[in-house]
Image (spheres, grey):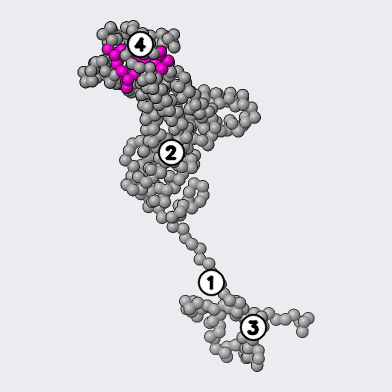
Amino acid sequence: MDTIASLFSFITTPVSWVIVQFHKVYGAIFGADTGWAWGLSIVSLVILIRICLIPLFVKQIKATRAMQTLQPEMKKIQERYKNDKQRQSEEMMKLYKESGTNPLSSCLPILAQSPFFFALYHVLNGIATGKTIGVINDTLLASARKAHIVGAPLAAKFTDGSGKVAQLGASLTDVRVVTAVMIVLMSASQFYTQRQLMTKNVDTTVKTPFMQQQKMLMYVFPVMFAVFGINFPVGVLVYWLTTNVWTMGQQMYVIHNNPTPGSKAQAAYLERLYKHVTHHGKIRRRSEKAIVKAIVAKGRDRNEFERKFINGLTKAGLAAQADGSVVKSDVTAVATAEEGTTVAGAATPRRQQPKRQSKAQRQSGGAKPAGDSESTASSPSLEKADAPQDAKPAGAAKKATPQPGGGTRSRAQSGQRKGPQRPKSPSKK
């Protein structure tokens, strides 16, 4: 570890200078030789470094989003070369190169912090061995060796013996208890950060090397921190615990406000956004407008959660616009979803079924409604029926005379059709 730290000695002087400047501020409040002054100086160093790394973190998010846009292409490659893993990997790397994305972009913040981490380790190791380093002179060195954080000296390690710990003015039990607790918290925070990313902010519909990488990091990093943590001074443990907590909070903020499309976090986010929009009738935040604008631009390529959000707005009488805003919709016609199904709540005309008639009504021609009396009176058949009897031929009048026992009702009951009958064939007479 000393060899690795010496490789980053070029940044040791800037790191030690920043710690000394923060120590002057906190030393005036808590005392120059207290653990609060030196511990808060290290915490402030972490916060300053992470603030400077925010542009890199934004670049990491954009690269992650670019990886998400490649999910359909990755799925096609997996299906095409599912029996040839080597060809599948080659096609994946070719796709990354053509799109300009990097599956290792999630490691950029960690790689950028490495020089500062090893420089701080070099500074604290110099304090433990009683050597001046960077801008830390003999006076500051003596003050730092007196500083204790919850009973553990700033430069003490878990693996230090009782004699070395006694030189720093502490007991071996206190040092090992404090370092063990800090190592556990450091590993647990790293594991929770990676697990939160895998369970909430990853589109699980497609299996990609990126997901396998994240799953591997979820188990590898906590083990690495637990193994190497026993060789870290207390000040380095404070540094790494602080940066893990910062990463965890920063990722929780991103997952809550800008989740990955297709993830569980996006489903929860769109549900909250739907309740907010339906309650207020509009979108206020610029970030929310950007997300709605991206959903509208996808069209038929929307995922399940995005389609549910758009259909929910339609049911509520709202419509998402291309600029990300939401306006009231005046459309009263039948609303049809993208899958071809009718959206619940839309005004759909019902088809009226004809009234069923009895057998006797069907045989007798059916009973006409009362509302059809006027149209029936004006029909040609009734006009012929109302004509004078003398206008008809004598033969027709004779046929119209009812015979005993052979009335209209009896003919209807016998199954004969009402109205003029077709003459019989001469061969059947």
Residue 156 among those drawn in magenta: yes
Counting residues from the N terminus, which is met first, the one under dot 3 or under dot 2?
2
The C terminus, quarter of image: bottom right
Answer with left or right where residue 281 lies relative to residue 392. Answer: left
Counting residues from the N terminus, which is met first, the one under dot 4 or under dot 2?
4
Counting residues from the N terminus, which is met first, the one under dot 1 or under dot 2?
2
Q: Is residue 249 shown above or below 273? A: above
| Labels 3, 2: front one | 2
Answer with left or right where residue 111 lies relative to residue 91. Answer: left
Nearer-the-camera pick, 421 or 3: 3
Q: Which of the 4 image quarters holds residue 397?
A: bottom right
Q: How far apart are marks 3 and 4 (CA)?
A: 118 Å
Residue on which disc 3 sits: 413
Can residue 325 be spotted in the picture?
Answer: yes
Q: Residue at x 36, y 38 (%)?
A: 288
Q: Distance between the residues labelled 4 and 2?
A: 48 Å
